[in-house]
Image (spheres, rainbow, N blue to C red):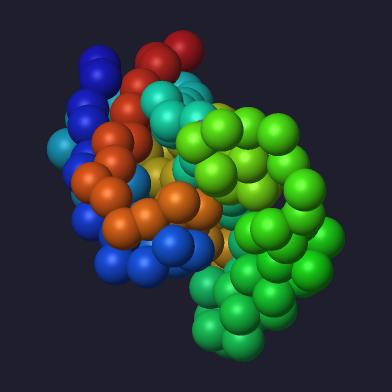
Amino acid sequence: MIRYLEVYTQKRTHFEDITAEIREIVSQSGIEEGICYIYIPHTTAGVFINENADPDVKWDVEQTLEKLVPWEDGYKHIEGNAAAHIKSILVGTSASIPIHKGKLMLGTWQGIFFAEFDGPRTRKVIVKIIED
Ligand code: ZN
């Protein structure tokens, strides 16, 4: 089973919590045991799993990535968004979460975030549910 989510980002860098949407897809699939595989088909965006209880964590991650990979740093890429490509590589473009008894096995404090690094844009998230 495959599903798509659309994410509309408003800023250059933006982390969107997509946990509720992914849980809904898993629930609708009716699959009790398997894997939820999330894939981002973009070169300047990504996906990560981390704390969604305290919004300051998101802010800290964004600020730290900004320090590690500043927007301007003598890059050669002519499109001017080399920093976004590098951040996409650092964060990664996929995540896999086990499904058990029909539910995602996320930890209590874990959420799934779509990570925009070159917004604003309309983005696609691919969600593949694999039954075992
Ligand atoms: Zn580029």
The residue drawn where x is 29% and y is 42% is 123
Q: Residue placed farthest to the top in the image?
A: 132
When the figure is inspected, residue 41 is found, relative to residue 101, above or below; the finding is above
Q: Nearer the viewer, residue 75 or 114?
A: 75
The residue drawn where x is 55% and y is 44% is 80
Q: Position of residue 117 (x, y in %)?
A: 51, 53
Compared across the picture, whether 10 is left or right of 59 comes to: left
Q: Position of residue 67 (x, y in %)?
A: 79, 69
Would residue 47 be visible to someone looking at this image?
no
Would residue 63 be visible to someone looking at this image?
yes
Q: Position of residue 100 (x, y in %)?
A: 48, 37
Q: Residue placed farthest to the right in the image?
A: 68
Q: Position of residue 13 (x, y in %)?
A: 49, 63
Compared across the picture, whether 75 is left or right of 118 comes to: right
The residue drawn where x is 49% and y is 43% is 45
Q: Nearer the viewer, residue 9 or 37?
A: 9
